[in-house]
Amino acid sequence: MKIVLVNKYWYMRGGSERVVFATKKLLESAGHKVEIFGLKHPENIIENNYFIDHISYSGAKGLNKLRMACKSIYNKDAKNKFEKLLIDFKPDVVHFHNIYHQLSFSLLDVVRQRNIPSVMTLHDYKMISPNYNMFHHGKIDETCCGKKYYKCILNNCMENMGESIVATLEACMRKWKKYSDVIDAYIAPSEFVREKHIAHGINKAHISTVANPVDEVDISSSEKDGGYVLFFGRLSAEKGLDVLLDASKQIPDILIKIVGTGPMESILKSRIRDEQLNNVELLGFKQDKDLDKLISHAQLVVAPSVWYEVLGLSILEAKLAGKVVVGSEIGAIPESLPSELLCKPSDSGDLAQKMQTWYGAPFEKINSLGKQFRKEVQEKHNPKKYLDEILSTYERISK
């Protein structure tokens, strides 16, 4: 088959990029022809001549800001270059990942006009909500889903009134042009994501759950206790990092290492300094062997999310390394962890208690559970299984 993979970025920026790169590799290794479309970026690993110029919305002023806002809703340049790619490559299927804002939903007009089967992997909630993670001002908000997009403005759900207005207009256009009906098949990474999209209007016959692939990595659970609890991921409010710092005060004898970068980095530094959280270390961005080593020697991994987590890639990576993970009972996390490892979201006391309990659990118990977790990920998130399922989806909608 000939497949076009579409994603904004083509460097390892986050979970969606991990999935799209893995998808490309798996398809090509199985003998399929793959072309890509996206946004030019200095950090891109791969690009082609069809990519549109890099777009940054920060710092825009006056008329330029207005032009940028219009482009985020409907990018004609992206539409034209995408159409040129499809004319030249003649794909059997287009597989969309993250396209909103920089590429925009204008791309869906092209596949509709040219009658090309299309698939979309749901990495977030943008197809049902103006706010892609349905989280703002420290809490989950589903009120602007469905036909109530105007509530995004009333509640300032983007935490920036200009952005909230643009996000609302984008959602209204998506609804008016019936873009959700253009996609022939949706792929949800978890049952939670599938059910949430169905609840807010996506046809359940068009959406299936396909677990994201997780590559086998050379991380083994070390018997050498590093003496710390590890968080790794994006440093943003929805990840529950304020809750983690509150919990750290209740377990001062347990060292907590935080790995990552993001919009909360300076806030976390200030809190650690001002509140004298001597048992918390902020290590910054780590990757490859440096991150693998930190995971390997962690006594425990923690995922205190307070939003509707789509999957929880860090949880899966920790499980594959044979690590026990304490996580919030929210979103898709309960699909990956047993009840005894779940804590109430936003409850620092419950999080601290669970961390303390499992940090001090006997090695035999930790090791046994870690082996079970590793096996679970190897089976459920096997790349070959993922490839078979997406190929089955491609073939079904191409008939």
Image: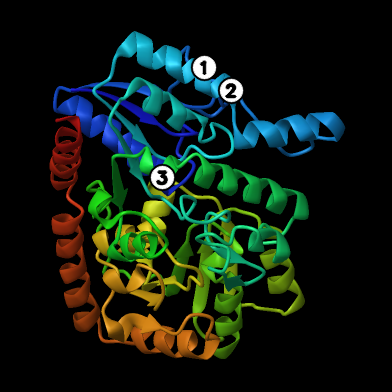
Q: Is residue 137 left or right of residue 360?
A: right
| Residue at x-position 64% and y-position 46% | 169
The residue where tag 3 is placed is: 180
| Residue at x-position 35% and y-position 37% | 20
The residue where tag 2 is placed is: 76
| Residue at x-position 13% and y-position 39% | 392
Q: Which type of secondary structure does the marked residue at label 1 adopt?
A: helix
Q: Is residue 166 above or below residue 134?
A: above
User: What type is the residue that disc 2 sits on?
Assistant: Lys
Q: Which type of secondary structure does the marked residue at label 2 adopt?
A: helix
| Residue at x-position 31% and y-position 47% | 186
Mark 3, Cα crowd under 10 Å, few <14 / some 14-19 / many 20+, is: some
Image coordinates of residue 116 in percent, x first then y, are: 30, 25
**Residue toward you, 101 or 21:** 101
The residue where tag 1 is placed is: 80
- Ranked by sequence position, the earlier of labels 1 and 3 is 1
Image coordinates of residue 282 in percent, x first then y, are: 59, 63
| Colour pattern of the rendering | rainbow
Image coordinates of residue 64 in percent, x first then y, are: 80, 29
**Residue toward you, 289 or 332:** 332
Q: Which type of secondary structure does the marked residue at label 3 adopt?
A: helix
Task: Give the CA distance from mark 1 to mark 2.
Answer: 6 Å
Q: Nearer the viewer, mark 1 or mark 3?
A: 3
User: What type is the residue that disc 1 sits on?
Assistant: Asn
Q: Is residue 20 left or right of residue 108?
A: left
Name the image quarter holding residue 340.
Answer: bottom left
